[in-house]
Image: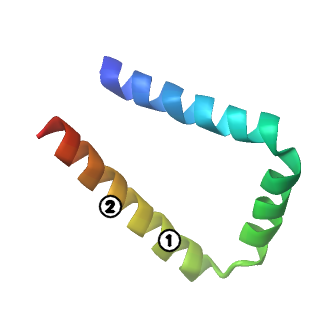
């Protein structure tokens, strides 16, 4: 369970750093996401999730 909390903490750190360093870029990414079709966002999210699971599997293996 502590590993899950650590992973979530790292996600928050990375997002926070991005918003702090390039707020304009993050706004641009959000606008782009709003204009992207739902199906494309779903497919991209699934691909990224699979890559994440694969990375964790490799590291923990």
In the image, 42 versus 59, the foreground residue is 59
The secondary structure type at the circle numbered 2 is: helix
- Label 1 sits on residue: 44
Q: Is residue 21 above or below residue 36?
A: above
**Among the 4 quarters of the image, the one containing residue 11:** top right
Label 2: how many Cα within 10 Å (few below 14, some 14–19, many 20+): few
Q: Residue drawn at (40%, 68%), measured in percent from left and top?
A: 47
Q: Horizontal placement of 32 versus 37: left or right? A: right
The secondary structure type at the circle numbered 1 is: helix
Coordinates of residue 36 in the picture (x, y in percent): 70, 78
Q: Horizontal placement of 60 versus 43: left or right? A: left
CB atoms at circles 2 and 1 under 8 Å apart?
A: no
Which numbered dot is residue 9? none
Coordinates of residue 24 in the picture (x, y in percent): 88, 52
Q: Is residue 32 above or below residue 23?
A: below
Q: Coloring scheme of the render?
A: rainbow
Q: Residue drawn at (65%, 39%), measured in percent from left and top?
A: 15
Label 1: how many Cα within 10 Å (few below 14, some 14–19, many 20+): few
Which numbered dot is residue 50? 2
């Amino acid at each position: 369970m502590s590993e899950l909390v650590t992973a979530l903490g790292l996600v928050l750190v990375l997002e926070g750093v991005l918003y702090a360093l390039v707020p304009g870029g993050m706004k641009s990414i959000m606008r782009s996401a709003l204009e992207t079709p739902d199906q494309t966002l779903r497919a991209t999210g699934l691909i990224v999730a699979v890559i994440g699971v694969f990375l964790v599997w490799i590291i923990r293996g």
